[in-house]
Amino acid sequence: MANSAVDVRNRRFAEAKELMKTIYETEKNFVQSMVDIVANKDFPQKWGFEILKEMGEKIKSICKIIGRGKMKAVFFGMTSSGKSALINTLLRDNVLPSLCGETTSAFITVEGTDEPNEYAEDVKGSRIKIEDIGKRSSVLESGKMSCDKITVYWPKRKCGLLKNELVVVDCPGTCTSSDTDDQVTEYCVDADIYIFVVNSISSLNEAACKFFEEVARRFSKPNVLAVFTMWDMAQQMMDEQNRPESLDHLEDRRIAIVWYDLTIVVNTQEKVRGQHQQRATELLKDKLGVVETDEDAAERIFFTAPIEILKKDKGSLLKDWQEREKEFYRFEGTFKV
């Protein structure tokens, strides 16, 4: 029954792609005809010519995306934002290198395979052992940003997301060098969906946001989800920074701690989360026009700690881990749709 459902989804996806391709090819031909007419006729000041040209370029770009056989999902963000960790959690295994500092130096694409075992290949088609991906793609191992391309073939039976003709791209972190940023823009600008990954301890970066403005310029409204990772560490830091040095002078220290937890910590966490939420909403609604209301934006914004999902010993996790886990599954469910 499960395989039958997957086949139906794949068939509908293929049919939808063909229908969209037909529609946009027709639009492209129509706009190109208008461009040719305006270019060859002596219209006053060539009214609308530049607008038509820009529209034509956008439609050509969309046709290129639709023409792909698979959907392309790009995980985008600054270095050490948690992109690789988020992908590992979706795969339910520590496949991609995920450490502190500048980690991923390559474009790592993950595709589904019907083969029973996972494997990887470099850009020349040579096989790479899964355990060697870190050596080939980590800045900590190579000491430089190579921007190499590696493809991981992951068994579809291990990850339901990959059954629906989806490829996942983990790109090098942005804002490390202009050369790397240019390569990220060139390689990732034509994705079907973008997962904007942000470290909760920091915030949305203007340089990273400009990437999406460039996407919007080329393709109109990009499909974007915003995921704030490391929310566990952010909550812990807020807890430690706001806790008074001593509560011993109060008559009932236990009541004081409870009062503190219910006021100062919660209030600070709500402010920080609200700030992140506001900036992400401004990006999605005001700058990109992806959504129309704040409520719609909220459905595309997530606060979680993906690395917690892979830990078997939940007793060692920080408090409120269930809420962060619930947020991850909400993200995963939205991503699947």
Image (cartoon, helix red, strand yellow):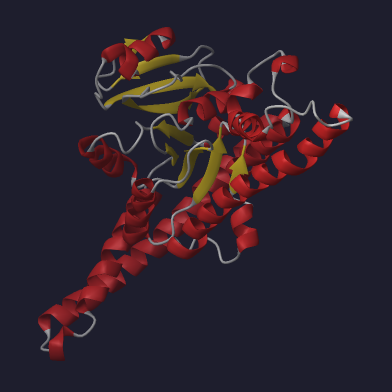
Q: Residue at x 61, y 43 (%)?
A: 302
Instruction: Residue 151: give x, y in percent of width and height.
Output: 37, 23
Query: How far across and how far down the image is residue 232, in percent?
Result: 63, 30
Residue 43 shows in the view:
no
Q: Is residue 81 above or below residue 215?
A: above
Left/right of residue 250 with respect to residue 19 in the rendered view? right
Quarter holding the C terminus is top right
Q: Nearer the viewer, residue 74 or 226?
A: 226
Residue 89 image-quadrant placement: top right
Of the pair 178 and 135, the residue shown nearer to us: 178
Q: Position of residue 176 (x, y in %)?
A: 29, 34
Residue drawn at x 17%, y 81% is 38
Q: Is residue 304 shown to the viewer in this render?
A: yes
Q: Residue at x 79, y 25 (%)?
A: 248
305 displayed left or right of 313: left
Q: Position of residue 254 (x, y in %)?
A: 86, 28
